[in-house]
Image (spheres, rainbow, N blue to C red):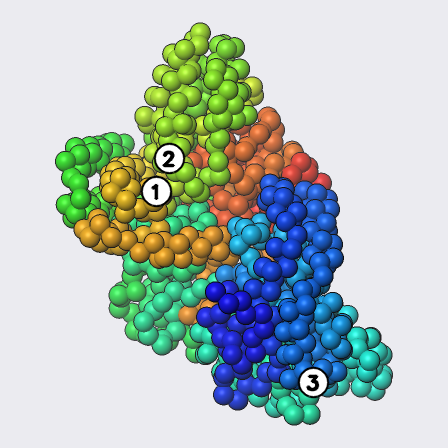
Amino acid sequence: MIEQYVLDLQEADETQVAVVGGKGAHLGGLSRIEGIHVPGGFCVTTDAFRRIMAEAPSIDDRLDQLSRLNPDDREAVRTLSAEIRRTIEGIAIPDDLAAAITRALGRLGEQAAYAVRSSATAEDLPTASFAGQQDTYLNVVGPTAILQHVSRCWASLFTERAVTYRRRNGIGHRTVHMAVVVQQMAFPHAAGTLFTADPVTGNRKVATVDAGFGLGEALVSGLVNPDVFKVRGGEVVAKAIAAKQRAVHALPDGGTREVAIDSQRQEQPALTDAQAVRLVRLGRRIEAHFGRPQDIEWCLADEGFQIVQSRPITTLFPIPEAGDQENHVYLSVGHQQMMTDPMKPLGLSVWQLTAMAPMHEAGGRLFVDVTRRLASPASRAALLDVIGRGDPLIRDALETVLDRDDFVPSLPDAGPGPGGPPPGPGGLGGTPKAGGASAPVEADPAIVTELIERSQVSIAALERDIRTKTGPALFDFLLEAFEEHKRVLGDPLNLQAIMAGMEATWWLNDKLMEWLGEKNAADTLTLSAPGNVTSEMGLALLDVADVIRPRPEVVAFLQGVESGESVESGESVESGESGESGESGESGENNAFLDELAQLAGGTEARDAIEAYLGRYGMRCVGEIDITRPRWRERPTTLVRVILDNVRNFEPGAAERRFEQGRQQARKKEQDVLARLRALPDGDRKADEAKRMIDRVRTFIGYREYPKYGIVSRYFVYKQALLEEAERLVRAGVLSEQEDSFYLTFQELHDVVRSNQVDGRLIQRRKDAFRSYHALTPPRVLTSDGEAVTGAYRRDDVPAGALIGLPVSAGTIEGRARVILDMAEADLEAGDILVTTFTDPSWSPLFVGIAGLVTEVGGLMTHGAVIAREYGLPAVVGVEGATRLIRDGQRIRVHGADGYVERC
């Protein structure tokens, strides 16, 4: 193979990233678009970079060291990356390579001014832009200076920021190579950036132009604030003209300098409105060529606009595919389900196949289209009511969209329509609207017993019948099982029971506030409600701790497991990151510690207690709506730290005492409320109505958690069967590992099982996409224009500096904040306040050991809120940015009845 060291920009295109890097490939593509002017130039290819790297074998050892460093160890990364850069810059460029670069300069003008720009092969990609991670040098004049700056660009592959960025994006140092773009300088009157989609809201129909005088370096470096133009539909819809006191200009002999702008000119716009609109038209042409929104760098010189760079905007949240050009409004399913992490394709497709409403995928998350519900006045009111009770931010966001008269058309009242209902307050999809689409049920505990028995019978039949199913027949069976799954969830009595508890809660809060002036009275009335499988799960782990606490050898052994070392064998028992790799492969290793446990004094009893717990709750895990996530049964080490916290922080019998204490508090509260009501005018009627609602809430609010328990119980059965099929495919050499099946949809996996063939490139693309989705924040509300509508609380009744959220469980508590993003890493002391992004049911075991709760995601009837009330924990949810704004270890005060958090 003949090495090619130099390639003209016009010979490059987007298919040649491996040769000319991301920037070079995009510039080559830009130069081919009609009407787009790109300054001429050439690329020093990655062959040249590899040639240079081969001149210094010592770099290999340093790269090994670099890959082993913790990216958070900034000093070590800084020192080692600086050594690598010095080594590269010290390598003399071989004569034949230098001659190739000099010949290319001669064709363009040897003494002309050039921009010398790094162009890495992992740069300007759809999922990682690497913007600003490597170096660019402007106004470089003469062959000697060009060669020197080419070396600097090669070395800039190992700047501290580039090294850290690669590590955080899962990109290996050896997999990236550096090309260098050498491009004729533009000497502009004005320069700046153009985003073809609004970088803040994500709206694909609004372009944003930033503009300043002179070279764009003044804006990039933050030297000046830019003029900002918002352009939509061929007109400037908003603009802000900044006072631009300085600019960066090129020097005649090379290099750049800052210059002062005349005071009379500082507040003049860098572009006219007509120029901004013309620039956006060019941007739309570029966007159409690359097939996605672009971040474009431009210059305006005498000859017009020149484009000097275009890269994908990687921070935009994708838009669900609708298949039409109509306006759509989408609600996040993850915010209802308390799981806003991305899901793998198999998890997405199984949830879609078992959901009660049509769901649309985008960015590894699911959304429900509520456009039809919003278009009809009656269904709109019901939707806003039920959503607003659960999450005021979503309601406010929807009202923001509705205020735009032309976005959602108005239709006559005709029911939900094909758009389907939104996820109900329980996140199951299709629950009745508030106000009662069906008659309320009486407070009869036999109803709950019957519903649980129906669910258990259905799951037992599933476990029995699935055992004989393999191959394509398994998938046909599962499709039938999914229909049974939906039948159980859609049972009218099931939906009535769910709504009965929630509507009774709302009634009590509304009426007792009206009659007695008491906020959130239902919080105390629901303490220790019977039959709540999620709160029972947390208390049951206290009972496990009671078995372990008096057995010191077992405690010591579990402490070894927690730290990653098995006491007996010294083997590592890593818990790993929740929800990522090794789901089933670690199952044997994770379960091995239970077998070791039985060899210790008292270990058999401890193992049996843990096994009994896993027998009832082992199908649960963080992010459990994604079938691919590792269940506690597969990774029981996840629970070890929580068990040890319970051993340390509680006395024997804590579970029973805690439940009874809550029950007594609720009973006392009921007596107090009824007595106060009877003392009011028309008090007997009010007390009788309240008593009926208290009985209803005590009967049904605990059952609200059971349908989710049934879902994840079924999911675990589905998963075990699908993993057995995946293992058969591994043995047949079709899949490399079981977990590859997680990156296929249910139908795709079905096809692979039938054909014994798989597209390995598809699996790799899905893995790369899934990794990139972690960097995206899903919006509560998303429009078909791509706009992420956040919503606001719009309150002025909180102290200055307080963090506002939704009050979901009354009480005020001050304590140490523990900011925890992974349940397996929790290390809690009595009195701590848990601060995290979201809490699905799997977090409940932590709730027994905390004093309060703050989450970024949540609503009045989401799982964390319900369990916080059951345990009597002051809680505020929906606190935007809580894990960023509250420091781990900081003292905070949670106002659970008023919905705000103070940092002390």
**Residue 872 circle label:** none
Q: How many marks?
A: 3
Vertical position of residue 488 compared to residue 99: above or below: above
Which residue is disc 1 drawn over? 737
The answer for how far apart the CA atoms under marks 1 and 2 are is 9 Å
Q: Quadrant of the C terminus?
A: top right
Q: Residues within 10 Å of mark 3 (few under 14, many from 20)?
A: few
Label 2 sits on a secondary structure element that is loop
Q: Quadrant of residue 216?
A: bottom right
- Residue that carries the numbered disc 3 in the rendered image: 109
* Position of residue 434 measured from the top left corner of the image (x, y, whole percent): 35, 53
Q: Which residue is mark 2?
A: 585
Q: Quadrant of residue 538?
A: top left
From the viewer's perspective, is the residue at label 1 or at label 2 nearer? 1
Label pair 1/2, CB-CB below 8 angstroms = yes
| Residue 176 in the image, given as x and y percentages of width and height | 55, 57
Q: CA distance from mark 1 to mark 3?
A: 55 Å
Q: Residue at x 75, y 82 (%)?
A: 111
**Distance from label 2 to label 3 (Cα)?**
60 Å
* Horizontal side of residue 344 vs 771, given as left or right: left
Dot 2 amino acid type: Gly
Task: Give the mark nearer the N terminus: 1 vs 2.
Answer: 2
